[in-house]
Amino acid sequence: MSNANLYCRFEQSFSANAERTAIRAVDGGGHLSFADLAGGAARYANALATLGVEPGDRVTVQVGKSIANVLLYLAVLKLGAVYQPLNAAYTAAEVAYFVEDAAPKVIVCDPSRHAEMRQLADRCKVFAVVNLDAKGEGSLATLAAAMEDRHDTAMRGSDDLAGLLYTSGTTGRSKGAMITHGNLESNAATLVSLWRITAGDRLLHALPVFHVHGLYVALNTAFLAASEIVWFAKFDAKAMLAEMLSATLMMGVPTFYTRLLAEGGLTRAAASNMRLFISGSAPLLPETHREFAARTGHAILERYGMTETGMITSNPYEGERVPGTVGFALPDVSVRIRGEQPGVLEVKGPNVFKGYWRMPEKTREDFSADGYFITGDLATMDQEGRVSIVGRAKDLIISGGFNVYPKEIEEALDGLEGIAESAVIGVHHPDFGEGVVAVVTASGPIPPEAELIAVLSRNLAKFKVPKRIFAVSELPRNAMGKVQKAELRKRFGDVFRAG
Ligand code: MLC
Ligand code: AMP
C-alpha cells in the first residue's frame, strides 16, 4: 500500500528542490531552503514524538505567525497526527471549548499564555503544554533544536485525519471539521494545476496560518509546487507593495485588496512582475475588481471555498474572470442548486470533509441523502456553470475574512446587566467588507457603549466584538415573532459609511 500521508507529496518536492529558498521572511525572520524545511519538520516531529504524540492524536496550536509554526504544521502531518489550529485572537474562554472538545495530546501556545493553558490542560487531561512565540522561540523550539533532523513519515490512508478546523454553527456549539489527507491532497493538486503554480513562483504570504486560506490553500499549493514563499508576519499594505516587484503570486482576502488600493504606490509598474492575484474567503466587490484592474492591469481571480470543503469554485486562469462571480466548479468537484435560483449551493467531491468531530447528527443534517454537502451559501448558476454567491441562508457575518456568528454574540450580550435582548447584524464596512453591529433593548439602565464593548472583549476575540452597539425601544419582529434583521440592516446600514 502506498502512503497517502500528504507529507510524502511535500517530501518529494522538498528533496527535488533541496538547495532552493523555500521561505523568506521579509522582516528579518531569516530564510529556509527546502532542505531546511524538511530537516526542521523532522526535528519538530521528533520533539512532538518525545511528548507522546502518535498517529491520530490531536495537537492544538494557538501561536503567533512564525516560520517555526510552519515547521510545526509539517511535523504534525509527518507524524500522522491531527493539526488543530486556533485563531491567536481567541480568548481563554473560547480556547477552553476547543480543547475540551478536541481532547488533544499536546497544546502548543504562546509563552505568555502557558500558565493559563497548563490549568486548562490539567482539567482536560492533556498530556503536555509547550510554547512557541511569534519569533519562533520557546520551549518547543528548544526541544526541537536538540533533535535529529530525520523522522520517518507515518503511514496514513487518504481517509485519515490531517486537520481538525473549527467552524461555528449558526445554532449552538462550534463544530470541528474533520479534514483528511485525501481532501488536502486532491484540493492542492487541483489548484496547482488550475492556477499554473510552479517552482518559478514567488508567493506573497500575509494571511494568518490558522485558517484554510493561509494554511491549506496557500501553504499546501506552494509546497506541492516548490514555490518560494515571501513571508509576512501579518498583512501590511506598504510592506506588501515593497515586495511586489520580487513576487509573482498573491493570495488574500478582499480587505487586502481594498487596503492595497488605498496606497498611491499600487501602479502598473509596481505589479509588473506579478502573474496572478487571487481573492477569496469573502465577497470581492465588483468595484474593487474593476478599480484594481484599472490601476494594475490585473484581473483579480476570485475563488470560493469553505473550511469543510476547501476550494469549491474558481474563476478561470485563462478565460474571463467576471467581477462578482466565483467562477466554475473545480475540475474534480460537482456543485448544484436544487430547486429555484437563487438557492443553496451543494457540493460533492474529494475535497469534501469527512464530517463533524464527534457530531454524527450535525454531520447528517448538513449532507443531502445522495451525499452532497449543503453549504448554506445562496448562489445562482448560469447555463455554462458559472456560479455567483448572492447571499447566505445561514446567519453569518464575514468581517475582514473572519467569520462571526451573530448567535454567539447575542448570547454574550443577553447575559449582560441591563440588556433585555439583542440582535447582531453585519453591515457594509469600507475596510472589513462587513462590520459587526449590535442592536439591543433595555431591561434596566444600559452601560455606555464603550463599557459594553470592553466587557464583551474579555471573553470574545476582538474581531467578533461589535464595533457599534445601539439601544432601541424594541426590535422589529414579523408576525411569527422573529426579529427582522433585514429591517435592522436597512436602518443601521450606513453607520460605517464616511461622512
Ligand atoms: C482585526 N480586527 C478586526 C479584524 N481584524 N475586526 C473585525 N474584523 C477583522 N477581520 C480588529 C483589531 O483587533 C483592531 O481592534 C481593529 O479591528 C483594527 O485592526 P487592524 O490593525 O486594522 O487589523 P489588522 O490587524 O490589520 O487585521 C486586518 C486583517 C486581518 C484583514 C489583515 O483581519 C486578516 O488577516 N484577515 C484574514 C482572515 C483570513 O485569513 N480568513 C480566511 C478564512 S478561511 P482594536 O479595537 O484593538 O483597534 C475561509 C475559507 C476560504 O474563509 O474560502 O478561504
Ligand atoms: P469558513 O467557514 O471560514 O471557511 O468560511 C466559508 C464561507 O466564506 C463560505 O461559506 C462563504 O460564505 C464565504 N466565502 C468564501 N469565499 C467567498 C467568495 N469568494 N465570495 C463570497 N463568499 C465567500
Image (spheres, rainbow, N blue to C red):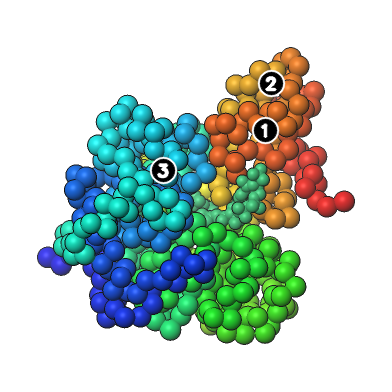
Is 205 above or below relative to 470? below
Secondary-structure class at tag 3: helix
Q: Nearer the viewer, residue 36 or 460?
A: 36
Q: Label 1 neighbourhood size at 10 Å, few (<14), some (14-19), many (20+)?
A: some
| Horizontal relation, residue 2 to residue 182: left or right | left
Is 270 above or below relative to 208? below
| Residue 146 picture quarter | bottom left
Q: Residue 211 appears at what percent x and percent y? A: 46, 54
Secondary-structure class at tag 2: strand
User: Which one is earlier in the sequence, the residue at label 1 or at label 3?
Assistant: 3
Q: Residue 98 appears at what percent x and percent y? A: 40, 37
Q: Is any part of residue 110 visible from this angle?
A: yes
The residue at which mark 3 appears reads as: 111
The residue at which mark 2 appears reads as: 419
In the image, what residue type sits under mark 3? Pro
Q: Nearer the viewer, residue 23 or 400?
A: 23
Q: Is any part of residue 54 visible from this angle?
A: no
| Horizontal relation, residue 42 to residue 399: left or right | left
In the image, what residue type sits under mark 2? Ile
Discs 1/3, front? 3
Establish whether ligand 1 lies closer than 8 Å to the Cβ of label 1.
Answer: no
Residue at 69%, 75% in the rendered image = 266
Secondary-structure class at tag 1: helix
Q: Nearer the viewer, residue 382 or 493?
A: 493
Residue at 24%, 60% in the rendered image = 43
Q: Residue 427 appears at what percent x and percent y? A: 71, 46
Q: Label 3 neighbourhood size at 10 Å, few (<14), some (14-19), many (20+)?
A: some
The residue at which mark 1 appears reads as: 453
Q: CA distance from mark 1 to mark 3?
A: 27 Å
Q: CA distance from mark 3 to mark 2?
A: 37 Å
| Residue 447 picture quarter | top right
In the image, what residue type sits under mark 1? Ile
